[in-house]
Every structure is written in C-alpha cells, then in structure tokens.
Image (cartoon, rainbow, N blue to C red):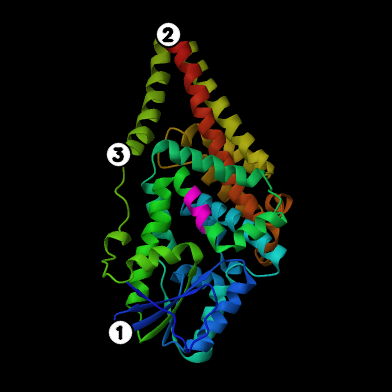
Amino acid sequence: MEETTQPTVQLPERVTHVRVHDKDVYLVGTAHISQDSVEDVRTTVEQVHPDAICIELCKARHQAMTQADNWQKMDIVKVVRQKKAVFLLAQLILSSFYRRLGEKLGVQPGAEMIEGIRQAEATGAQLVLADRDIEITLKRVWGYLGFWSKFKLAMQLTGGIFVHEEIDASMIEQLKKQDQLEAVMAEFAGQYPEIKRRLIDERDTYLAEKIRTAPGKTIVAVVGAGHVDGIKSQIQQEHSLDELMQLPPKSIWPKIFAWGIPLLIVALLIRGFGEGTTHGFQNIYIWILVTGTLAGAGAALALAHPLTILSAFVAAPITTIHPLLAAGWVAGIVQAFIKKPRVSDLEDLPTAINTMKGFWLNPVTRILLVVALANVGAMIGVWVAGAWIAARTV
C-alpha cells in the first residue's frame, strides 16, 4: 500500500492520505462528538478540493440526520404493528446517550457528518453515502448471535432504560481520543466477537469498497476513527458487497420454541382434565391469572393507562399460546389509541429521552415501554404458570 502526505497540502493530524491506483483518498478519522472533527472535515475539504465526499452514513441515517422534523412524521401505531417497537426503543436509548454527550461538549452528535454534507453542497463535490444500510447491519448482528449472547445483550439494553449513567469529564476525554476509540472497539470485540465482526469488520470492508469506487480522482472520506485502519488495509483490493448485504439464514430453533412451548402448554391443560374437570379448570385459571397478571404488571410498570393494563391482562393468556401474537403489541396499540401522541410530544422526543423521567413520561416512549415490559411480563408468566401447571399435572 502506498501511503503519503503531499507536501503542498497541510492536512490535520487525524487525516490519512492513501494513494489508490490513480486516486488520492483522504481518510478523515473522526470522533462522533468532537468539535475538532468538524474542523478537520472543513479544513481537509478546503485544502484538497475533492471531487467526491464520502460519509459514514446510509440512506436511512442520512435522512434521519438531515430532516429535523423526522420524529414528527413517525406513526407510532405503525411501528408497533410492524413489530419494530423494541428496535426503536433500543435506538432511542443509544440516541439518549449520544445526545447527553453532545450537550456536555456543546457539539451535536454526528456534526462532522453534517459538515461533510454541507461541504459537498457548498463545493459541488458529489456526496456518497458510504455505509451499509443500518437495518441490514443490525439484522446481521442479531441474526448471527448465539442464544446466550442475545440474552446478555438484551439485558444490557434493558438496563440502559433503568440506569442513567453520569457522563463525567474523564469519559468525555476518553471518547474524544482516537486511540481510545480503537481501544473501546478492541474491548467490544472481546465481549462480543461476533458483533464486532458484523458491526465493525464488515462495515470496514463495505466502506473501503464504496470509497474506492467513489467518482473522481480526489476523495475525502469522513469516517469514525476506529474504522480508519480497517479501511486502509482493504481499500487497495476490489470487494464484492453482495454477501455483506444478505440477511442471515433463519434458524429453525426459534420456530421450534415458538410453536413447541405453546403446544406443550395446551397439552398440559388438556392433560389436566384427565385428573378431573375441577383440576383441569384450575389449571386454566392458573394460566389466565399468572400470565395476565404479570403482563398487566409489566404494562403498569410502564405507567400505562388502566384500560391498557386491562388489555394486557386479557390478551396475555391468549397471545402466549399463539406464536404470531404478543400481549405487548396489543397493549401498545391500545395505549396508542387511548393516549395518542400529539405533534408536541413527537417534537419533544429528542429532549425527553435525555432523562429517565422524560423517557417514562413522554407518550411516545411510554408506548414503546408498554410493548416491551408487557411482553417481558407475559414471557415470565409463561414459565411460571407452565411450571406450576406441570407440577400439578405430571
């Protein structure tokens, strides 16, 4: 690989120049919450006058970042019906963390990407959205995880709702340093090597190929500092992106559990009548009360409307034995209709998620919490009621 710095160009310290065949590529390694990174992007573009500016965004993230009224257009009922409530909830938790960091630093998270967009518009350089679609990335991350890794990750995400970690000066300084970002990724790889492969390594390859094939002879690429080394090591070779765009094959085990457990429960309920009619109906009462009560308790924990709590109670005994339904979805839709979010609630969403109180009280995030916590309650109810009925019947 040929890596040089042209003597006539005064590049910022965090910019790496790589010669790729007949192209000059300038990799601007950024921290996503650093004003210095914004200045690095501006200075680099002013110095090298690129034909194209590549940014580490996909179409969906670019749209979310550049459309200020994006939250106002969200249809929360549609989100619940499409079974994306938990995904959106996790996204909001991450957004909350980055927003708090941005407030501490006085810099909008992703400001360096916005500066890249602004520079492309100002200079006439072609803007290239160089990152893989976020939905494909997350589906590959989740789809290739083992059961216990999924469980551990889900618990950490859930903990993010309840734990409001204080952001101190040392954390901010660590996150601003390029070498620290790389160290964080190394630690991340140790905890979840499969996630690191899908979330970082694959995107290094994707970004390298999109940058390599960007139009023009002079390219500026605005990427996270932790991606620079991976891009440098791969940008000289041609890569097919087809495999990186494929969704992971669906495992048969989730289907077996999804259908097998309800069938087992139904078999136990039927078997209970072999012990007598009274015994059989007692098992049914146990199933209704335990699953319904715990699902309702989950909705109540999310401060749901009383009718929403009732809907979770009524839905849980039925949805828990139907693999295609969930008590949380029913409760979430009921909550959305009873407490339909107003435009002001959607406008307030970026601010509300900054605090746990706001997260809990905003009507939009409350709906998401209703879905998640009612489903968790119903799931616990399945195991508690199932074990109770099995002990009485078998």
Question: Magenta stretch mostly in which secondary structure?
Answer: helix
Query: What's the mark number on residue 22?
Result: 1
User: Does residue 84 appear in the picture of this structure?
Assistant: no
Residue 275: assigned label: 2
Q: Which quadrant is the N terminus positioned in?
A: bottom left
**Residue 341 x %, y %:** 65, 59
Mark in front: 3 vs 1: 1
Q: How crowded is mark 1: few (under 14 residues within 10 Å), some or many (20 or more)?
A: few
Q: Is residue 46 above or below residue 294?
A: below
Instruction: Name the N-terminal-most of marks 1 and 2.
Output: 1
Along the line of sight, which residue is nearer the eye, 304 or 185?
Answer: 185
Left or right placement of residue 355 versus residue 215 in this view: right
- Residue 252 tag number: 3
Q: What amino acid is at disc 3?
A: Ile
Which of the numbered marks, if any, corresponds to residue 352? none
- Direction front: furthest residue: 7
- Taking the view exactly as shown, the residue that stands out farthest to the right is 357
Distance from disc 3 to disc 2, alpha carbons, whole Å, reads 35 Å
Q: What residue type is labelled 2?
A: Glu
Q: Element type at marker 3? A: helix
* Relative vertical location of residue 44 with respect to residue 258 in this rendering, above or below: below
Q: Which of marks 3 and 2 is nearer the N terminus?
A: 3
Instruction: Magenta stretch: give its range.
Output: 182-187
301 displayed left or right of 80:
right
Q: Of circles 3 and 2, which is in front?
A: 3
Vertical placement of residue 248 versus 217, above or below: above
Marks 3 and 1 sit apart, C-alpha to C-alpha, by: 49 Å
